[in-house]
Amino acid sequence: MSRSGGTASLFRSEFKSDAQEPEAAESAEYWLAKDLGRAADEVTFYEGAIKIKDVQGFELLKWLTPYRGVCKAPCQVKEGVIEETEVMILRNCRDGYGACRMLDIKIGYETAVAGWQGKSSFGAMKQSYVDSFTNSADQGFRLEGFDGPPAVITSIEQLMDDDQASKWTTSVALTPKQCMRMFLQRLPASEFMTHFLDLHSVGNSGFANNSKYVEQPRPSSGLLVVETQEIILLQCIEKLAGFLDACRKVSVPQQWIGSSVMLAFDSVADFTREVLSQGDITRVHIFDWGRSELNTPTKHEMLSEEEQAERQKYWGYYCGGGARLLYD
């Protein structure tokens, strides 16, 4: 499967035809598989979360991307090459969507800490340099990935791939892909949320006729575009507000470095009037735990004062970045 950021491979997965799990009745592609080769640290986090997700003071864990466990499965690692691979099973947040539009928003003013979860001093220094040039330093979060973007973002990507642009990016030692990533990372929430909610049609415009952009047709029935945008935004606000409220009430401060919040919806769905009162048309989850620790009261008591203060500091960064995202 394609991915907007990160390094671990993602694989489509399907239930067998005789599967009895309740999720199988909902969708054959309810879960996806993530290669454990670059995600082993996340398993510890998820397994720990399962044990305490119903404990008072850890309500924030209900926003985790649903996790099923780990297993070995035959995976197509290359074209025509199938290998037995250890994978982690996570909710497929694209499942059921005709065209998934998804934001990967990395939270926190600092996204790497020297000596934390295996991060070297040099690696942390390089990441700190990156942070200083992105929206992380300004608002405490940055857009790390944008799946299923609207035409305006696609047009910018195509400009980056233009011959003249390619010559410029080469001169500054950046590939077009790297330039596009930095462009996204520097966007404030007010701008990338505008693009996230952009559902207008490019129709027969010059861009549509002279580019590789393929517009997904939107049904003409159901809600108006502006109504759909309002409901999507309202649901994202409500879910983010609920998550941040739970963050403020957590039993002990956490140190979640480089983790992300995901916002997603189906950009071509035919939403009906019923969603105004009972529908849920967005998905909001937290994910990416390779550099994060799940702290508990028992663990916290065993930490030195300096270590406790460090967790308080970085939890403040995390909550502050999340609050700024909600505000904007």
Image (cartoon, rainbow, N blue to C red):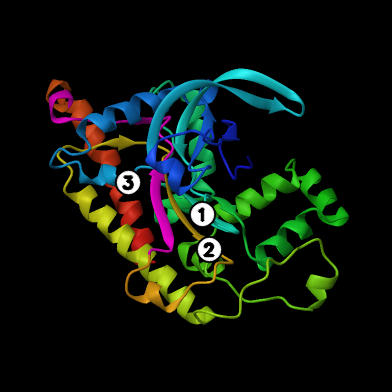
Residue at 71% across, 67% down = 215
Q: Which mark is residue 137?
A: none
User: What residue is pinned by disc 1?
Assistant: 103
In magenta stretch: residue 272? no
Whole-percent x, y for residue 295 in the image:
23, 30
Question: Which residue type carries mark 2?
Answer: Phe
Whole-percent x, y for residue 213 in the image:
76, 63
Residue at 48% across, 48% down = 93
User: What residue is pinned by disc 2?
Assistant: 192
User: Mark 1 falls on what kind of element?
Assistant: strand
The answer to whether marks 1 and 3 mark residues whose Cβ atoms lie closer than 8 Å is: no
Can residue 187 be seen here? The reply is yes
**What range is drawn magenta here?**
280-299
Task: Sort mark 3 into few (<14), some (14-19) or many (20+) by Cα contacts within 10 Å.
Answer: many
Q: CA distance from mark 3 to mark 2?
A: 20 Å
User: What residue is pinned by disc 3?
Assistant: 318
